[in-house]
Structure formats: C-alpha cells, structure tokens
Amino acid sequence: MSKRARGEEVTAEERQFAQGIMARRKEQQAKRLAEYAATHAPKDSTGMVPLPDLGKGTYKGETGGLYPGGENTPPPTHRKAGLAAAAKIAPIDGKIVLLSLGMSNTTMEFSRFKQLADQDPAKNPQLVIVDGAQGGKDAAAWVDAEPVWQEADRRIKAAGVTAKQVEVVWIKQALIQPARLGEFPKSADVLRDDFIKIAQMAQKRYPNLRLAYLSSRMYAGYAKTMLNPEPYAYEGAFAVRAAIQAQMKGDLSIEKGEAPVLLWGPYLWTDGTKGRKVDDVVWKMDDVSPQDGTHPSDSGRQKVAEMLLRFCKTDETAKPWFTGQVVKSLSH
C-alpha cells in the first residue's frame, strides 16, 4: 500500500506475500466467527426487560426508564427546554432539514423512513429529509473522522439544502465489537461519551440545530457475529440515557450553543418475540439479515421506519415541525 501511494511498482513476490497475509487473516476471522456461532445460538428472547417496562427495577445496578428515576418522559425542566427548542424551529430560506447521523443500520432504516415520510400527506412540505448515516461508520468513526462529516455535507448539498437549514437530527449509534471495551458499564460509558461528542460536533457544523433525537439499537439476540450482539445492543440504551442526563446536569449547555436539546427518539428494542408493554412490536428472525443476524432485513427496516414516522407525527416536540405547525419563517 505504501509503495502504491508513492507510485512505485509492486513486484510479483511482494503481491504474493501480501495476498498470503490477507488469506491467513480471512481464515482466522472465519474461525473466530465459527467459534462465536457455536457458542452463541440465535435466540428469540434474552429475558432482559425493555427500559420503558423496567421502570424502577434494575439491570446490573441501573434503574430502568428512558429518563432518570425510572420515568419514560423527561423531567419538567428538560421537557420545557425541548418544547422551547421545538417552538423555534421554522423554515430557514423556505426549508427545515431533518438529518440522520449514524451507521449502517441507521442508513438502512432511515432511507426507508424517508420513503414513507415523503409519501405521507401529514408531512410538512417545507421539510427536507436527508440521510447522512453511512455504512460501517460507528460512533467512533463520527468522533474521529472528518471525511464522515464531509460525506454528510455532500448529501445535504445534493438534496438542495444547506448546513444552516439543518434544525433537527436523528442520531442512532453503536460501537463495532463493543465486547473489546469490557463488560457493562464500560462499553456503555464509551458510547455515552461518543453520543455527547457527536451532538457537540453536530452543533458546530449546523448552527441552527435545535433538537437531537437519540436512539439505541434494535434487538440483537439473533446476531451471528461479534459486531454488536446482546447484551450490548440492549445496553446501548443506557448510553443514550446517560448522554441526555449529562445535559440535564449542566453539561452540553443549550444556552451557550454547545449542543442541541437531547431527547429520546423512538426506543427500538424489544425482547425478541416477547415484545414489550407499550405496543405490539416484536423482533423475529425474519426481521434481520440471514448473513449476520445484526443488520435489518426489509421487514426490519420497515418496522423501524414506521416507529420513527409514528414518533415524528405524535411526539409533542416533533409533531409541530414535522406536520408543518409552524408560525413563522426565518431568513438567514
């Protein structure tokens, strides 16, 4: 690779050497995957309780609930901040932009959401939905790599809008192979910090950003690889909650323009086919890719897209800008 970068010729011997190393790495990876699959059979339930159902119960010492105290709604002060931010969202030069930031699952799900939303008569005609999420770009990639953000900017431009028109983002993130970071809460703490950094970076790039809705992963009990299996998909929700709670404690100042208001977006996880109390959503093996059991299939994409669309049409901070219930237009 270094010789190619310098424009030098790679000899046949060097090529053969490199190919041999790559082949051995591929064999080692296949062996690791086979060993993982042999000891982690897909299962349609883990016995873990969805955060909204867990309430004041605990998981490894942490209470449930999407927000502190086992609650599923934001405390009054944070709710007020969210409503105030939503009230400020209005068309800028005629448009409001909703942008997604995330990984492969995110782009697969959000692209389907965009299709549904753009066909929905309830959608604000001044709302432009842009999928900035990218395959293979986990939370760490968004924190560390400028080209990821540049690609998001390219997509914004391709949609005929600008960075200053981005007022809302959906951030759905996870970490590649989180087991390497240690058992809970270690990997969740790393993901929490990444959520916070991504929100801060987004605010700097999109000066009129008002709201950031955060989501964790869907059920991963069918995972066939170490990419992001259970319990890490489940535990990602604690990272989301901790990032939001950090803002409640005074970090990520909204007034100083350090970050948008952080709120939960749709909570996607259910205990496989056992589901959850809040609705009839379940995750079946058919809802994930047969190759890795981690990425959504077409039916999985549809489920997430429908949950996100329902959220945008019903959440008290999202409904006004999504449906067009805005009272003024700004020009910048």
Image: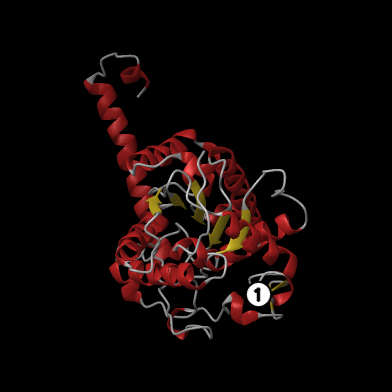
163, 331: nearer the viewer: 331
How many marks can you see? 1
**Percent x, y of residue 188:** 62, 58
Q: Callout 1, which amino acid?
A: Gly
Q: Residue at x 64, y 61 (%)?
A: 82
Q: Quadrant of the N terminus?
A: top left
Judged from this view, the residue extending furthest toward the left is 12
Q: Quadrant of residue 74?
A: bottom right
Q: Secondary structure at mark 1?
A: loop
Location of residue 179 with respect to 279 vertically, above or below: above
**Percent x, y of residue 298:** 29, 67
Q: Which residue is mark 1?
A: 65
Query: How was the colour assigned to the protein in this rendering?
Result: secondary structure
Q: Residue at x 73, y 69 (%)?
A: 76
318, 246: nearer the viewer: 318
Judged left or right of residue 171, residue 66 is right
**Percent x, y of residue 100:** 45, 52
Location of residue 322 with respect to 314 vertically, above or below: above
- Specify whether residue 35 is in view: yes
Judged left or right of residue 128, residue 244 is right
Q: Residue at x 25, y 22 (%)?
A: 13
Judged left or right of residue 39, residue 237 is right
Location of residue 172 with respect to 6 vertically, above or below: below
- Specify whether residue 40 is in view: no
Q: Residue at x 48, y 49 (%)?
A: 138
**Percent x, y of residue 197:** 62, 45
Judged from this view, the residue extending furthest toward the front is 328
281, 159: nearer the viewer: 159
Residue density around tag 1, few if under 14, some if 14–19, many if 20 or more, within 10 Å:
many
88, 143: nearer the viewer: 88
